[in-house]
Amino acid sequence: MSTGTLGLRLGTPVTALALPLFTSYYSLLAYRVISTRVGSGVFVGDKSTEGKAAQDTPDPLTIAARSHANFAENVPLALTITALAEINGADRNILVGALGTLLFLRVAHVEFGLRGASALGPGRIIGFLGTLGYLVGMSGYTAWLVRGYWGY
């Protein structure tokens, strides 16, 4: 399939295939917030421990809540951009590779970053910068796919 032509597909099978993976991980993050809330008895707010400096021992509820919220802040936009690329004729192999990379980056951000020592594991910066790169790169690719509409 040519990626240089404008084409409207009836569906987004690549994005649809990736959704269960992203949704499963999102659900795990939500579960961690809920289980930490129940375990700490804090049902409103994001502090389960009192009197500790933020840098000494990151609060488990704050980590769980931020992991969940950060995923919710970034992944819907990324999947929307990806779906628009797919609708406009993106190469299926590029999308599969890109979505696999995005899932890896989001998992790294939490599991090897926020959940690391002092919430500062190397996965945090890798996941953050990688996700920003994904958003910029995929949106640029999507704009390139529709260049014919603008006469280029």
Image (cartoon, rainbow, N blue to C red):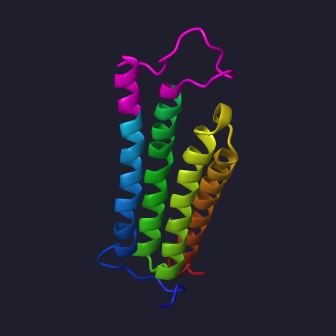
Q: Is residue 108 left or right of residue 91?
A: right
Q: Residue at x 64, y 56 (%)?
A: 130
Q: Position of residue 23 (x, y in %)?
A: 36, 54
Which is more toward the observer, 56 or 127?
56
The single residue placed furthest to the left in the displayed view is 10
Q: Which residues are magenta?
A: 33-61
The answer to whether any part of residue 27 appears in the image is yes
**118 left or right of 35?**
right
From the viewer's perspective, is residue 53 above or below residue 14? Answer: above
Q: Is residue 16 left or right of residue 94?
A: left
Q: Residue at x 43, y 19 (%)?
A: 45
Image coords of residue 147 (percent x, y): 56, 77
10 up-or-down from 57: above or below: below
**Pick the front one: 135 or 65:** 65
Q: Position of residue 87 (x, y in %)?
A: 40, 74
Image quarter of the C terminus: bottom right
Q: Is residue 51 magenta?
A: yes
Q: Main secondary structure of the magenta part?
A: loop
Please tell me which residue is depicted at 58% across the width and 74% down the height of the picture.
144
- Please tell me how many numbered marks the rendered image carries: 0
Instruction: Based on the picture, tell me whether residue 38 belongs to the magenta stretch.
Output: yes
Residue 91 in view of the camera:
no
Point 54% across, 86% down: residue: 4
User: Where residue 113 sits in the image (x, y, percent)?
Assistant: 63, 43
